[in-house]
Image (cartoon, rainbow, N blue to C red):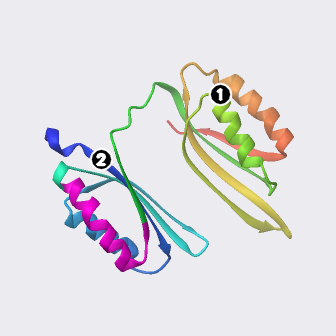
Amino acid sequence: MTAFSNHQIVLTAIGEDRSGIVSELTQLVSDCHCNIIDSRIAILGNEFTFIMLLSGDMSAISRIEHTLPTKAMELDLLTMMKRTSSHNQAKFRGGYTLVYTGIDTPGTLSKVTRYFADNNIIICSLKSDTFEEDEVTKMRCELEFNIPVEVDVDQFKINFEELSHVLNVDYIFRRIR
């Protein structure tokens, strides 16, 4: 890899879900000589969302910046781009997932994410949704995160146990790395 190939850009596209959008966007990335380093797709309501981290030399990054607006208009997509650099991850004790479920109650996710922020834990990914069970709307959330070396994992878990009782949620912690 040359010194000129380490440029990165985050690209986000949102639009009505329909067949072929992923193919069109990934073809554009390829045509611009960029590489997809990481990506996420989600369908929210009737809207398609696609987030990609792209890399390439300066020419490739400039090409995607200039080509995407026209393609976005053609595909009826809202897009956003932001140049970035490689992520320098701090030292951590371990990687974990937390999955919790309970009756859908406003503010639960906010309180869980506040607990993480108060413990200086950065959330790597988060997925939440609601579902019907026994005629009750329930929520499910899955977070992936790294616990920094300075955080006592056992105390973190004990304190979360207390929070889970307050929030009336069931949960599972699992180490993943």
Q: Quickly name the residue at label 1.
A: 119
The amino acid sitting under disc 1 is Asn
Q: Which residue is mark 2?
A: 8
Q: Magenta span covers which residues?
A: 60-78
Look at the image and say whether residue 61 sits in the magenta stretch.
yes
Residue 21 appears in the figure: yes
Q: Residue at x 72, y 63 (%)?
A: 130
The vertical placement of 68 against 74, above or below, is above
At which x and y percent is residue 5?
A: 18, 45
Alpha-carbon neighbours of circle 2 within 10 Å: few (<14), some, or many (≥20)? many
| Residue occupying image coordinates x 23% and y 42% | 6
Callout 1 secondary element: loop
Quick one: SS at disc 2?
A: strand
Give left or right: position of 27 versus 103: left
Rendering coords of residue 30 (x, y %): 23, 64
Q: Quadrant of residue 164?
A: top right
Provide residue 81's location: percent of width, then percent of height.
Answer: 37, 56
Q: Quadrant of residue 131?
A: bottom right
Pair 1/2: label in front? 2
Real-space CA distance between mark 1 and mark 2, rounded to the nearest whole angstrom? 30 Å
Q: Give the left or right position of residue 11, taking residue 137 as reference.
A: left
- Marks 1 and 2 close (CB-CB < 8 Å): no
Horizontal relation, residue 24 to residue 79: left or right: left
